[in-house]
Amino acid sequence: MIKKTVLFTMFASAVSVVAAFAADPAPVAKPVIAKICTNCHKAEAGALRGYFDGAAFKSKTIQIKIDESVELVRFDEDEVKVTNGEGKTADGDLLHQTKKGHEIKIEFVEKNGVKTAVRIIEKPPVKISKEMLMVTADVGKLVALGPEKGKYFLFDSRPLPRFQEGFIPTAVNLPFPAFDKLAGKMLPKDKNALIIFYCAGPACNMSPGSADKAKKLGYANVKVYKDGMPAWQEKNYGVLSVPFLKEAWIDKDIPHVLLDVRAANDTARGFIKGAVAFPAKDAAKLIKALDIKKNTPVMVYDQSGGKDAVTVASALVTAGFKRVVVLNGGFNAWQALKYDVASGKLATKATYTPKPRPGEINLAEFEKYAAKLPANVMIIDVRNPDEGNAGMLKTAKLIPAEEFKERQAEIPKDKLIITLCSTGVRAEMAYHALKAMGYTNVKFVNAKTDFAKDGSYKITKD
């Protein structure tokens, strides 16, 4: 009996050990290429493809966003070669001109787990033959006529999530990644019909790619609006469907400004939750007083998606707002879909607060810790020693981000770690570096901070 018990115990222990290993999955490898890039490219060894998310020149680090993942890559300005969108190649100083969100490729070498860039290539504008090219004015004239009078078919080649943010009036979504699957159902039967494709701008391959596929199918009158949605919204309003407003914006709690331009007697009968009273008759005065940034997503609606909404949206575009859309069908379309209708008093002041970046700390919370540091919190100033010597928080510890690995013993894992710099760029990079090192309780200050020699500071948020 004792022998059987021992054998059972040994067996149970072995099972427990196996189960413990099975319950500890191998870390998931980070992506090396953004999903959207796979439409035209394949993953390569020693290369990353994604979107430029910032560069910290003092810590010699570039941050690249690959879908929901972030990679940090070291660089030496004198050694790395940078090729910009116009094809000019120079040293790392050229990175100063790279715009956030631009698609880039980083070729790197890796040593002791540290990636160092040897070449950074910005995606160049797509080349399109002159006879296929359309400009904003050309598209605008056709849109003003409408598909029936203008005799055209306008297709948005962007993926559905981008289309849901707003699109050119009269456009239909035919995403490039699903072109082969949907083309037979969506393209016109007439192979001589005027077909126009657009996407996310000059460096985007999706509309030229769609045009090439359409030509191979035998379509003879194919055009590309290369400048795409960004250029359109510089001078025109876009449109948005009611389901998209609800599902892609309101339900997902994506920050935006929603303007109800109806008269007070109409809004008294109900409105869309979150809307701001913005009567069309007072639009000129209200637009001047609108205290939001010009790149804020602004949705405008009236009773039926008619003249008032269009007039106000056009005035907003003229005033310099770059992401203005009109809600197709207006409030009537909202009610027709039996969506919830709010009642009571409409807000009268439009406000917009961008969604915090992953890991971003609330500034009020940070300032509380900066004034009196709790025992379970550590603030790390990730700037260089010369910057720290010129002035830094008395409650912070200076550890430059590039020294994290060799000074890891100074960074406890049982405390909340808050990273800080002068702009937020290096602080965010340091946040990602600590996360990659296994720290789970980390936040960063995403703001401009000016430090004084006496330990005081001034913090501002754009």
Image (cartoon, helix red, strand yellow):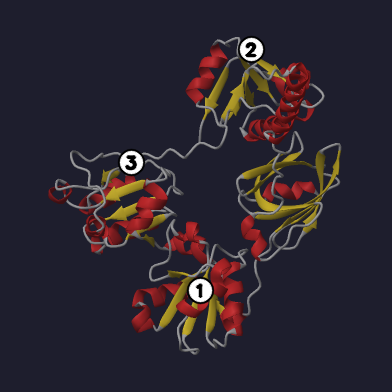
Residue farthest toward the left in the current orientation of the protein: 265
Q: Which residue is mark 3?
A: 350
Q: Quadrant of residue 276?
A: top left
404 or 281: nearer the viewer? 404
Residue 362 position within the rendered picture, expressed as x and y whole percent measured from the top left: 50, 27
389 or 106: nearer the viewer? 106
Reply above or below: 282 against 223: above
Of labels 3 and 2, earlier in sequence is: 3
Give the quarter of the figure containing the N terminus: top right
Of labels 3 and 1, earlier in sequence is: 1
Query: How much space separates mark 2 and mark 1, taking CA atoms?
Result: 61 Å
Q: Which mark is residue 394?
A: 2
Residue that appears at 67% across and 18% down: 391
Residue 221 position within the rendered picture, expressed as x and y whole percent measured from the top left: 52, 86
Foreground: disc 2 or disc 1: 1
420 or 77: nearer the viewer? 420
Q: Quadrant of residue 347?
A: top left
Label 2 CA crowd tier, 10 Å (few <14, some 14–19, many 20+): some
Label 1 CA crowd tier, 10 Å (few <14, some 14–19, many 20+): few
- Residue 225 appears anywhere in the view: no
Query: How much space separates mark 3 and mark 2, taking CA atoms?
Result: 38 Å
Amino acid of disc 3 = Ala
State left or right for residue 113 relative to residue 417: right
Amino acid of disc 2 = Lys
Q: Which residue is mark 1?
A: 182
Reply above or below: 244 against 213: above
Badge 2 marks a residue whose secondary structure is loop
Of labels 2 and 1, earlier in sequence is: 1
